[in-house]
Structure formats: C-alpha cells, structure tokens
Amino acid sequence: MSNKKVLVLFAHPSQKRSEVNTPLFRTAQETEGVTAVDLYREYPHLDINIDREQERLRAHDIIVFQFPLYWYSTPSILKEWQDLVLEYGFAYGHDGLALKGKKLLCAITAGGREDAYQSDGYNHFTIRQLLAPIEQMANLTHMEYIAPFALFGSRTAAEEQRIDQHVARYRKLLEQLVLNQIDWESAKNAEQLDITVSSETSEASL
C-alpha cells in the first residue's frame, strides 16, 4: 500500500495555557509524511488565504482537525476556515468534487471525564454525537469521516501523568495514517479510535 499524505490543521487560541495540545502538535510537526499547520499562527487576524488552503487540501489524502473541545464545538478559527475554504463548486455542489475520497478525522481534547460524554452522562451526548456537524460536513463534501481520537479529562492529564502516553498514541496514529495501516472500515464505524502503545510493541486497535 502506498503512503498517504496527512494534513494536520491545529486550532488552539490559547496555546500558552495548553498542557496537552502543544506537545501533540509538536509531535505532528516531527512525524514524517505529515504537514502540520498552526491556523492561529498563520492567520492571527483570521484573514484566511482560501486559495492556499484549498491547494493544501488537494495535495493531501487525510485531513486531521486537531483542537480542544470548546463549548461542544471547535475553536472559532476552524469554523471560519470551514466557512471560507469549503466553497460551493470546490468542496460540494455541482462539480464540487475536490475532496472526494479523502478522509477526515478529529483529534481532540476534552476537559470532562469520558463518562461525562455518554447519553446518560453529564453532557448527555457521546463525543461522536457532539461532533456530528463535522461528520455531516465530511458527508456533504464527499469525504470519508473517521471516528475521533480523543483525550478526556485533559484538565488533570498533567498531574495524573497521562500526557506522555497520549502523545505516544497520537504519534502512532499519525504514523499509521501515513503508512495506510488503519482498518478504515472499523475506524469509520467506531465511537472513537482506540490506539494502544506499549513499551515493547506499538499497535493500534479500533
């Protein structure tokens, strides 16, 4: 199987306060075969270069939205990016087939614990249900939506010493995306991606 070109679009408006997303993005920058873009750094005034972003999409096979979950949604720049870049005639509508067959997934951090993101939990919805607008965006633009990769309880991840392990899981996921070693059918149907990494062997299970 041929390698895939992976594009990570990182959106975090308060990186100085980030204990998890900053090392995750650094890992994306260091992974061969991955193009890592810090949207807030490139567009501090939200003046998104539509042509450049559309060309990036054309040049890559797999798109990863990396962001902290803010009020059950994305940081504002990622919504602005979608509004401007995914134009009619490019991403959807008549002749809008530029993204057909590409894959999209979200790599997110959530402050609440995992049991809060259940139908009977504090937030009333699963993480995949909360990301349904992005999943439908993928459907409309002819992309294949992949289950999200998530870290829950991000507020306490540092004190609980869970960050290094999650960074290792993210690195493994990105490497497998590049090498096209994902069971795509399982990944499409899962509630979330479960990437396991041990000290002896590294493996992904979905």
Image: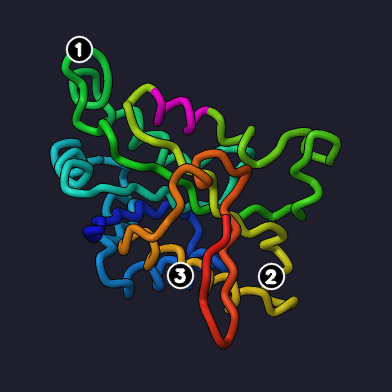
Query: Quadrant location of the N terminus?
Result: bottom left
Q: Main secondary structure of the magenta part?
A: helix
Closer to the eye: label 2 or 1: 1
* Type of amino acid under label 2: Ala
On screen, 202 above or below 106?
below
Residue occupying image coordinates x 48% and y 32%: 135
- Which of the 4 image quarters holds residue 157? bottom right
Front position among marks 3 and 1: 3
Task: First in sequence, mark 3 or 2: give its number.
Answer: 2
Q: Residue at x 54, y 47 (%)?
A: 148
Camera-nearest residue between 79 and 194? 194
Whichever of labels 2 and 1 marks the residue nearer the N terminus, that label is 1
Distance from Cα at disc 3 to Cα at disc 1: 38 Å
Distance between mark 2 and mark 1 Cα atoms = 46 Å
**Disc 1 residue type (three-letter):** His
Disc 3 target residue:
172
Secondary structure beneath disc 3? helix
For label 2, the residue is: 157
> Dot 1: few (<14), some (14–19), or many (≥20) neighbours within 10 Å?
few
Q: Which residue position is annotated with label 1?
A: 94
Q: Residue at x 26, y 31 (%)?
A: 100
Seen as rendered, the residue at the extreme top is 94
Q: Earlier in the sequence, mark 3 or mark 1?
A: 1
Q: Is residue 176 left or right of residue 100?
A: right
Q: Is residue 162 left or right of residue 35?
A: right
